[in-house]
Image: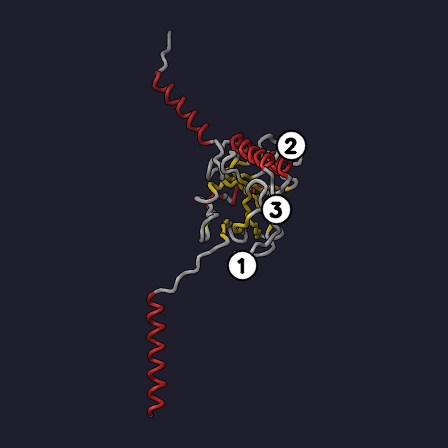
Amino acid sequence: MKRFINPNLLALAAGAVLLQSARAQYNANDLVLGFTQTGAQNDYVIDLGNANTAVGANGSSVVDLSSLINITTFNSTFSGGLANGVNMGIVGGNQSLSGRDVYITSLRNGLGAPPVAGSTAPPAVASTPMSSGIGDIATMVNGLGVSAGGSATPAQAAANSWSTLITSLNPPSFGADTGRNPMGQASSSVIYEDLYRGTPGAAMNYLGYFTFDTSSGESLTFTPSVVAVPEPSLFGLTAGAGLLVLALRRQLGRRQG
């Protein structure tokens, strides 16, 4: 008995595979967040999306990224919580020669004022090692099959894990190829990390900082180095002017009396 396969179904299946493949491709200048812990079986990797449009690295207001982290996944992956030796880092960049750049974090020493970096900027990275490092990021993201907003918990020993392709000192990895380590280790339920952007051979530029707070659930935010100061409202200006006029009238009345 012959079985006939609907060609339309085959086309739909092929389209679905192609769509999934397209979604798994690393997009230039997406920022990728990684958590590791010594002794843990897995890493936790999250694609935060584009540095500017999703994270707000070039913006002037705080961006809440908490919805991208699953606290249940985080706690089940890392025993003892954030303060128990969990390391956090963020990397990203553009590998193409035109517009080549790299994003990397450095542990921030306390909260402080947003315009001031709370860490030492990573040294400049030359063009070739920068390209290789971003290529390692793309290999990891594509291998894990994640896209902006997606996440994965690969085994640390896996070929596409954060531990293998980002922090390992054995090439190919971001750490080995660029000579830069994006990781910072938490010592409490809150960790702050400065974000820097660099172009080939140029000094790293401080853009702001990330805050990951697990003291009550989870909270991940990015605070840009230039935070907009709210302008005084028209009502406030009018009320202030009215009070000033009233005070002057009272003072004048007393003098005349």
Q: Is residue 174 above or below residue 229?
A: above
Q: Is residue 79 above or below residue 18?
A: below
**Contact, mark 2 vs mark 3 (Cβ under 8 Å):** no
Q: Secondary structure at mark 2?
A: loop
User: In which quadrant will I find the N terminus?
Assistant: top left
Foreground of the two, 245 or 138: 245
- Whole-angstrom CA distance, mark 2 to mark 1, is 37 Å
Foreground of the two, 156 or 192: 192
Q: Secondary structure at mark 1?
A: loop
Disc nearer the start of the sequence (2/1): 1
Residue type at numbered disc 3: Pro
Dot in front, 3 or 1: 3
x and y, in percent, of residue 206 in the image: 55, 50
User: In which quadrant will I find the C terminus?
Assistant: bottom left
Q: Quadrant of residue 79?
A: top right
Residue type at numbered disc 2: Pro
The residue tagged 3 is: 122
The residue tagged 1 is: 113
58 left or right, relative to 181: left
x and y, in percent, of residue 194 in the image: 56, 50
129 left or right, relative to 32: right
x and y, in percent, of residue 176 in the image: 64, 36
